Image: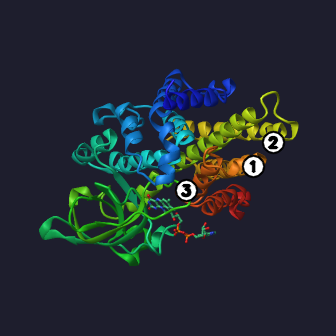
Amino acid sequence: MTPLEEIREDYLAMHGALDEPSIDAHLTGRELEVREMTRDVVSREVAPRARQADIDGEFPTHGVQALADAGLMGLVFPRELGGTGDTNVAYATAMEEITAACGSTSLVFMTQMHAAYPILKFGRDALAKQWIPGLLDGSIYGSLAITEPNAGSDVSGLRTRAVHDPAASGYHINGSKTFITTGDRAGVIVCFATTDRSKGRKGIGAFIVDGSQAEVRHGVPFHKLGMRASSTAEVFFDDAFVPEDAVLGGEGAGWRVVMQSVVKSRISAAAQGVGLARAAYARTLHTLRSVSPGRIPDEQLFVLGTLRGRLAQGRLMLITAARHVDENAEVPTGLIGMMKQSCTDLGWEVAAECARILGPLGDLADVGVERCLRDAKVTQIYDGTNEIQRLLIGREINQITAAPKQEESV
Ligand SMILES: Cc1cc2nc3c(=O)[nH]c(=O)nc-3n(C[C@H](O)[C@H](O)[C@H](O)COP(=O)(O)OP(=O)(O)OC[C@H]3O[C@@H](n4cnc5c(N)ncnc54)[C@H](O)[C@@H]3O)c2cc1C
């Protein structure tokens, strides 16, 4: 067996042993098939490269392309655009698998979906045909660009401006974005900009910017704590041009686009949390088994027992919320918030516990738990920080528990 084949065998044994049949019973036959396909691709093409890519900060082109070639990048997209028409549950399950092998690859993978989805949902047919097939087959990279130096949690504060030019039948975009995943190489950017700051949220639009034009400058990727093989960069718009028919839902529809897009992106982040928790657990189990081949000591087994239950809860929460998105047009903000916050906190907390019970081994790149811990941090930050999620959940609690108005109780 070659060293790469050994890693693959190890990976499959480790992760197969963690499947819980009672939770798998919540997945359809097709969703289980998607999981197996994903696990097969990641065990061959992603897991064996993940450790070195993290150390070198090398963009995971190989793994992302392998996932695209296997038809996995378009899980929730229609067939006519290169997708497979699968459920959000199938997507979440695939994301969990990819993340368990390599957080960075999962971040690039999900960002392709985050760029393509608003175009599918709000773009005209021609726009969808122009950009979505390339995003799904991996021939172009996409970014979703909301965050600015002074606007992230508070989207309404964004300053990137879009000025209508009727003579040119389009808009000129000026401003800058920061912390943009794949921003260093994005061929297409869903850029949120304001046409009128005085209108706040109502002045925001979602503009599909061709990232190859000279008026778009791509920054150099930042050095980061985790997800090191993915790229995160600034993007500058110096009079970038966007045709009128490349404004999603028309001028002023940007807030609606953000709100719908975050439902998908929060499923992605939550799946990353569960995937990182699983990876940390699997690597810990594997390591403890190697150092104590007979029987894992009780004090470590107690911790693993607790974590196994928490992992099962996280996966159930993820499947339940994604299923709700599949089956309902309206999705409560609180449900999405609870899923995002609890599953990403799970990734961080399980990785920290695993590092603790491993002692010095938890610190070793070869064991891989330290990578889970570093990768987990940012999942609590992006796609709406977990403080913002708690705020949204709290608002819903207030609405649900508000005292009935006087006239209603008469
Ligand atoms: C690796 C990485 C990749 C990213 N990828 C993208 C991307 O592809 N596209 C994109 O647009 N953005 C991206 N981001 C940016 C990310 O989404 C934002 O950084 C995040 O939403 C936080 O927004 P902010 O930067 O404005 O921070 P701030 O809002 O300034 O947050 C700072 C702190 O204040 C807290 N806080 C803020 N407001 C409140 C409040 N009202 N109540 C309580 N606490 C509050 C936050 O929770 C946080 O702890 C990425 C970031 C990272 C690190």
Q: Secondary structure at mark 3?
A: loop
* Label 3 near ligand 1 (CB < 8 Å): yes
Q: CA distance from mark 2 to mark 1?
A: 8 Å
Write down the quadrant of residue 285 in the picture: top right
82 displayed left or right of 290: left
318 displayed left or right of 82: right
Three-letter code for the amino acid on which mark 3 is drawn: Gly
What residue is disc 1 on? 353
Q: CA distance from mark 2 to mark 3?
A: 25 Å
Circles 2, 3 touching at the beta carbon (< 8 Å)? no
Earlier residue among tags 2 and 1: 2
Q: Nearer the viewer, residue 342 or 51?
A: 51
33 displayed left or right of 24: left
What residue is disc 3 on? 226
| Residue appearing at x 41%, y 46% in the figure | 60
* Label 1 near ligand 1 (CB < 8 Å): no
Q: Residue 164 at x, y = what percent?
A: 23, 71
| Residue appearing at x 51%, y 70% in the figure | 154
Q: What is the quadrant of the C terminus in the image? A: bottom right
Q: Is residue 368 visible?
A: yes
| Residue appearing at x 35%, y 62% in the figure | 191
What residue is disc 2 on? 303
Q: Residue 377 at x, y = what percent?
A: 61, 57
